[in-house]
Amino acid sequence: MSMPKHEEYQYLDLLKDILKNGVKKIDRGTDVALYSLFGKQIRFDLSKGFPLLTTKKVYWKGVLEELYWFFSGQTNIKYLVDRNVHIWDDYPYKIYKVKSQKSKVKSKEEFIEKIRTDNTFAEQWGELPRIYGEMWRKWPTRKKGRTIDQLKWIVQELKDDPDAKNLIVNSWNPEYLYTMATKEDTSYFPICHNMFQINQRGGKLSLQLYHRSCDSFLGVPFNIASYALLTLILARITGYEPGEFIHVFGDVHIYENHIAAVKEQLKRKPRPFPTIKIDSKLKKLEDFKPELITLENYDPHPTIKAELTVAGGYYEKR
């Protein structure tokens, strides 16, 4: 009897598909070429292990701290910078360069050091309003002072109606995005993983993510781990067993400058997935802290580095 195929091959096969069949596009704003497919799906049974990819080392600390940053409704990168997590540095620096009239900071490294050491500077320039955490926990409404906590709502709704089909958390607000926004209201960064839905069936909680624009080499492995972990946490809080994490891709692509790195990764064979241990203290939304989550038995292949393309967000016509 043959062994079932390792679930990581879904991701590796997607990379192969993009290399073979992807259509060449040019990213507006950066002019970087990419190769794109549209409308793909992969899924992971979370009872069989935690899908932190093994064919290259994924930045676990970044996954955990970023998810807590979102989950707790934070919008300032200082929390991440203080923990030496730099995955969101580029967009506040980009905004600073656009908006600062008296810029004395000449490099991203100097900018981040100011965020770390100068609280007043961090309060002004470290903010990413309407980032995922705010939209999940404090969605702004037309009524002044009223916000909506979408995470709290789905947890309560699931308790009230275990068979609910409406448990959606949305991060996509057209008022603040792209050329739909006015210049004074625009978010200068993109919302990429823009909507997820949870669903309970047979005592198991599953989560499906819609990811409208997907950097398959750098971003997607990170997003798989982040939303799989979110599924486990929500399952614990709501009292269900973990089900599946389902990842639905809109435009899924490989940037041209990542192709060599992708080909290196495709030479490697997956290793067993690690597992996640959640402390029994985590019983409700407010309990989640990074120190309550432990990653066990992660044995990946070495890191493969590639350059991040700071794409998306507000575009000013030339």
Image (spheres, rainbow, N blue to C red):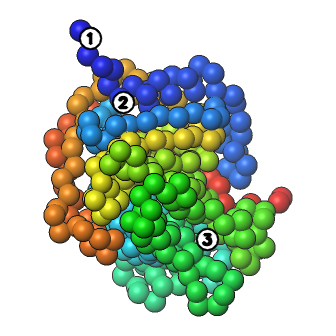
Q: Please tell me whether residue 156 is drawn above or below residue 162 in the rendered image.
A: below
Residue 8: mark in rendering: 2
Q: CA distance from mark 3 to mark 2?
A: 36 Å
Residue 280 screen position, x and y as percent: 16, 64
Q: Is residue 255 left or right of residue 59?
A: right
Measured along the vertical axis of the image, is residue 7 above or below residue 122? above
The amino acid type found where label 3 is placed reads Ile
Choose the circle earlier in sequence order: 1 or 3: 1
Q: Which mark is residue 2?
A: 1
Of mark 1 and mark 2, the one earlier in the sequence is 1
Judge the density around disc 2: few (<14), some (14-19), many (≥20) Cα neighbours within 10 Å.
many
Residue under pointer 3: 95
Q: Amino acid at mark 1?
A: Ser
The answer to whether residue 151 of the structure is visible from this angle is no
Near mark 1 (Cα within 10 A), the count class, few <14, some 14-19 or many ≥20, is: few
Q: Residue furthest top?
A: 1
Residue 152 appearing in the image: yes
Residue type, mark 2 in image: Glu
- What number of labels is visible? 3
Residue name at image x 47 percent, y 24 percent: 13
Residue in the image at 65% along x and 34% along y:
38
Q: Tell me where residue 217 appears, x and y as whole percent.
A: 47, 38
- Do labels 1 and 3 touch, CB within 8 Å? no
Residue with the most extreme right position: 318
Mark 3 or mark 2: which comes first in sequence?
A: 2
Element carrying mark 2: helix
Place of residue 315 in the rendered image (x, y in percent of width and height, measured from the top left): 74, 60
Q: Quadrant of the C terminus?
A: bottom right
- Residue 53 % position (x, y): 33, 37
What is the quadrant of the N terminus in the image? top left
Query: Which residue is found at the position 56% from the left and 47% from the top?
Result: 211
